[in-house]
Amino acid sequence: MIHKGLSIRGIGARTIDSVLRLGYAARFIARTVMSSGTSLRRPRLVIRELYFTGVLSLIIILVSGLFVGMVLGFQGYHTLQTYGSESALGVLVALSLVRELGPVVSALLFASRAGSAMTAEIGLMKATEQLSAMEMMAVDPISRVVAPRFWAGVIAMPLLAAMFSAMGIFGGYLVGVVLIGVDEGSFWSQMQSAVDFRNDIMNGVIKSAVFGFAVTWISLFEGYDAPPTAEGVSGATTRTVVTSSLAILALDFLLTAFMFRGL
Amino acid sequence: MPDKNIIEIKDVSYAYGTRPILTGINMNIPRGATVAIMGISGSGKTTLLRLIAGVMKARQGEVNVDGQRVNNLDSAGIYRLRRRLGMMFQFGALFTDLSVFDNVAFQMREHTDLSEAMIRDLVLMKLHAVGLRGAHRLMPAELSGGMARRVALARAIALDPMLMLYDEPFTGLDPIAMGIISNLIKELNAALGATSIVVTHDVQEALAVVDYVYYLSGGKMVAHGTPADIRNSSDPVVRQFVYGEIDGPVPYQYPGRKLADDMRLGA
């Protein structure tokens, strides 16, 4: 074991460690995708996980969506009215949510609500030898435990982001139209004509699918790779939230840059 | 005709990196026997169990289970072999998200096409064998340590294995639970017509249950024989273990600098 300090050697050792882990993570996700047969044959396994990752995340997603939308309503109105264009409030709320805030904020919430739970659950299953027991019973934990959770995460994320955006638009409507009194007709009609299905909505869906893939991958890998101790599992859970959040923001930047290149 | 011995281990050595864990192990376990592998923590006994179950592969020597060379099997072959093995883990390793019933039914649902009605009957029979038929609705978190171990035992025998492996089955149990488990090990071995290997450091319980003992120390097989042979062994290493002597060939003090040096008493 090389001593990891602040020396040049330490930097080298840390770099090698990170590259190695990245390699393990890549092999892990490849194995997971290749072992998806069981999940396809027995969709009940995926549905069960969809309940845990998706349905149980609904409350936090819907409430956050509503509040983000309401804040957008206030802030948007405040800025737009100085140019006399408060009738564009609907467009502003809808575009900010569908393109950016919906996918990004719901993915951040998903990482801290469902991702951390997945890491802790798999890490503890490993620490209490449940995964070894499964292997001893000739059942592959990757196909029985990991793959169903992976597909559930990938499916749940775009749906949660869509519900976040819908709830946010409703929040913007509540504040803008009901509370402040922006004209309801122009709020909705301007939104309808300005939001493009392919460029705005589909791009948002693509983003949230990518985030769902990344968050679920990170969460499952951290859990599977966690040292089988209390300290190891708590560290892995923290890393899941931190790494996922950074990955979401970095990917969002890259995806946005690509999507706007064509416009 | 099947071989007389279900397990034949010849000259097996295993190293973790450059650190040797097992060296030159030889053992034969006849069908129907109940055998203990004993030794202090770190003597390599759990590693030996893992080599038998194909969790790790010996690079030197032969590990034969039921006529198959485990260290040459691919992963599909090992999974096929494991369907005929039952293993009970140290703390049970029950699936905490499944009920007692679903834990025992797990392998039947994964590996067989049995109907749910048939599975229900089989699961209740297995639970009855360990005295926990009435507990089939409970979740693992609601079980005591001894009960969890018994459920794990019922789960391990779900598909009537030919070979049962027990990893430290007595650790952390009260005397009554210990008695129940050791009794079950003996009874189930006869009822299943299986062979059992018990890896343990609980000397008295194990000596009461098994037919034969292998004693490992520092990765080497230093003694083997019937429980009576082991009790009467004159080997100081075995004696220290069997009678729990504090100091002996296994030193009390963790190796380090001399006491006088650490206390700065050096002249």
Image (tube, rainbow, N blue to C red):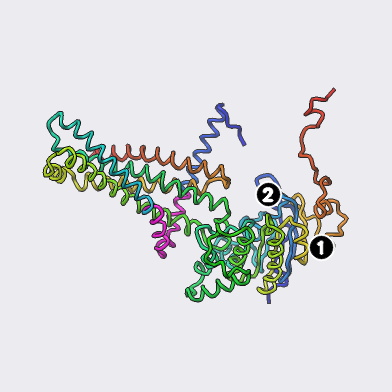
The residue under label 2 is B15
Mark 2 chain: B
- Residue B20, numbered label: none
Residue at position x 69%, y 69% in the image: B195
**Residue B225: mark in rendering:** 1
Q: Point out the image quarter for the C terminus of chain B.
A: top right
Q: CA distance from mark 1 to mark 2?
A: 26 Å
Q: Residue type at mark 1: give it.
A: Gly
Q: Is residue B48 visible?
A: no
Picture mark count: 2
Residue A35 magenta-drawn? Answer: yes
Relative to B193, residue B230 above or below: above
Q: Position of residue A123 (x, y in %)?
A: 52, 49
Q: Position of residue A191 (x, y in %)?
A: 16, 43
Q: Chain of mark 1?
A: B
Task: Find the magenta span and give its range.
Answer: A27-54
Principal SS element in the magenta part?
Answer: helix
Please give left or right for residue B243 compared with residue A233 in the image.
Answer: right
Label 1 crowd bin: few (<14), some (14–19), many (20+), radius 10 Å: some
Label 2, residues with CA under 10 Å away: few <14, some 14-19, many ≥20: some
Give the secondary structure at mark 1: strand
